[in-house]
Image: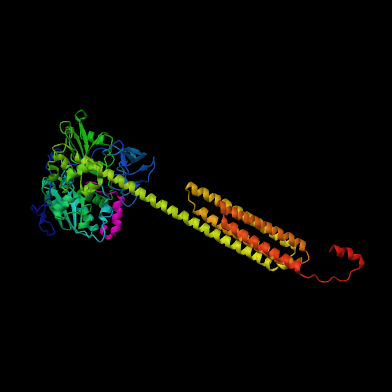
Amino acid sequence: MNAPMGLNSTAPAQQVTTALRIWDFNGGVHPPENKTQSTTLPIAQPPLPSRLILPLKQHAGAAAEPIVQVGDKVLKGQMLAEPFGRVSAAVHAPTSGTIVAISPFAVPHPSGMQDLCIHLQPDGQDTWGERQRLADYRHESRETVLSYLRNAGVAGLGGAGFPTDVKLNTPDHHPIDTLILNGAECEPYITADDMLMRERADEVIRGGEILAWLLGNPKIVIGIEDNKPEAIAAMREAASRCLVPVEIGVVPTKYPSGGAKQLTYLLTGKEVPSSGRSSEIGVVCCNVGTAAAAFRAVYLGEPLISRVTTLTGQALQQPRNVDALIGTPVDELLAFAGLQSQQLGKLVMGGPMMGFPLNDLSIPVTKLTNCLIASTPAEFPPAPPAQACIRCGLCEQACPADLLPQQLYWFAKAKEYEKAQQFNLFDCIECGACAYVCPSFIPLVQYYRHAKDDIRKESQEQQKAEHARLRFEARQARLQRELDEKEAKRKARAEEAAKAQSARQQPAAVTAPAATPAAAESDIKALKTAAAIARTKVKKAEKALSAAQQAGEHTAELEQELSQLTAASQAAEQALAQAEQSAAAVAPVQAAADIKQLKIDAAITRTKAKKAEKALAAARESGEGDVAQLEAEFNQLNAIAQQAEHALQQAEHTPVAAAPVQPAADIKQLKID
């Protein structure tokens, strides 16, 4: 930034004010102004249009949410769509009539895109609904007044359309010491703010008082370019009647002195941080039209349903400013100004530097429509074809944001967006000064806009991907918790079942000596069946695990299941072994004389042990099967066989008590015995 250019003082007022120092910023251009065409007539009120098209998104942030339905009768000023989300603004009926549709329609946008709109058919009565005022707003809370402005649909009328209640709701750690009302209106052709300040200066001043009160009563500075002497005089006179100090800062005419960052530096000498907001340096900048809208909302109870719009261009018979209802089709406004269709070459919404051409004349006026230029082919001739950059450096000299437009152009063209961001691409205000001075006629701003859109889209995709990742991880964690809970429940049930089985087996083992051979044999048979079933389940689980491992699938759950089945099988085998040991130990006592049965039992157990030994040896040779399980089974059967042999040997060596003397008839039976 450069040194201060000079001094400028305000007009006499009730409050004594000091001289205001005016600074200057680097860059800027001086295009032809073309403002006198539309300032010869006062602001006019055009007739009611045949239909009003009200986009639900006429501001920065989220679109409003409709609260009416097709067929509803509405009154002037009635809310049609309420704010949705923190950054949003309401939409109201500009006149009384009937809602005939809520459907997509072409909206003001360089791409000609469509968006959801409310279609209102006026009834010609222009009947107001109930209006609620806050004339004594100083006795209300700050939150109440901010909410009132939000519901009144007040948004910035100078540029991005940022909702005013959000802009004024500054954090406590950033106290505001200066409120700037932007009346510079530096872009050629546009005179809406100029005529507003000429004819409604008191509304601007009193609206500024409201905005200042919401910000904690900082000083008010109104910035106006020196090519608007009538507006300067009117604002000075209105400021003399103001209850708070107001300074009028007259700045040199240079484009883009009306940019928020540029005007902030012109009037305060403070630079807004890169990618930051002016509130971070204690300054809030609002358009004079926004201040007037706040006045009408608070004092008159009128929501934002109209705005001053400049109708100009050589294709119009009567260029002028009009107080256009929001939603009025562009063709009806141009017809009111005397459009000569045969001479129309290009229709531009906004100024010639930052505006964009319209291909559809039925597009509606929105809260951001400050100018419509109906130009002739001679007035706005087609741009010459772009040529190669000659690296002249004129774009850098003209840039008011102290950027390097040439470098940004190369990065945007090559889609090197990371480097473009490192060169502060988003500090570009898209004023068009660089393209205006480019001798190669390169549409630089279009490259910057495209790069910004791509970066925003990429950022949104990354946010969506990150959100999806977090949701996926949360789902996986939830599923894992459910699996852990199920596993814990299964383990608890298995432990309870094992305890119950152990409790059933313990009494049986204690009372085994007293049990009959048939009951013991029945118990052993049941235990053998349970052990066989358990072994079968283990083998099936092993096969399923092996198949899953070969397929590369998730095996954690199968491994847990196999571990549980193996433990259950081992428990069954152990119970069987204990029962067989008990039976083998009791058998000699119960049937001491039944040596034949003991021999049979010993032979059976030896056979089983041999079979188990062969199976174990085969498994060891082939490397297949569960060697550990076979070895445990062999050891159990071998132990049982040894017990059976020992019982047989005891029975064979146990002396038989002498039999009592029997009758002779029993000799045969004794021989048999």
**Residue 234 to residue 651: above or below:** above
Q: Nearer the viewer, residue 541 or 300?
A: 541
Relative placement, left or right, of 300 versus 639 is left
Residue 232 seen in render: yes
Residue at the (44%, 52%) spot, across then down: 475
The single residue placed furthest to the right in the displayed view is: 664
Quarter-wise, where is residue 127 in the image?
top left
The single residue placed furthest to the top in the displayed view is: 342
Q: Give percent across and percent down for residue 224.
A: 14, 49
Q: Give percent across and percent down for residue 301.
A: 28, 50
Tell me how many marks there are: 0
Q: Give percent across and percent down for residue 102.
A: 36, 40
Quarter-wise, where is residue 47 in the image?
top left
**Residue 29 to residue 522: above or below:** above
Residue at the (52%, 53%) spot, across then down: 558
Q: Give percent across and percent down for residue 422.
A: 22, 49
Q: Nearer the viewer, residue 124 or 161?
A: 161
Q: Nearer the viewer, residue 55 or 378?
A: 378
The C terminus is located in which quarter?
Answer: bottom right
> What's the coloring here?
rainbow
Residue 202 seen in render: no
Q: Nearer the viewer, residue 536 or 479?
A: 536
- Magenta residue span: 137-160
Quarter-wise, where is residue 374 in the image?
top left
Does the magenta portion include 564?
no
The single residue placed furthest to the left in the displayed view is: 6
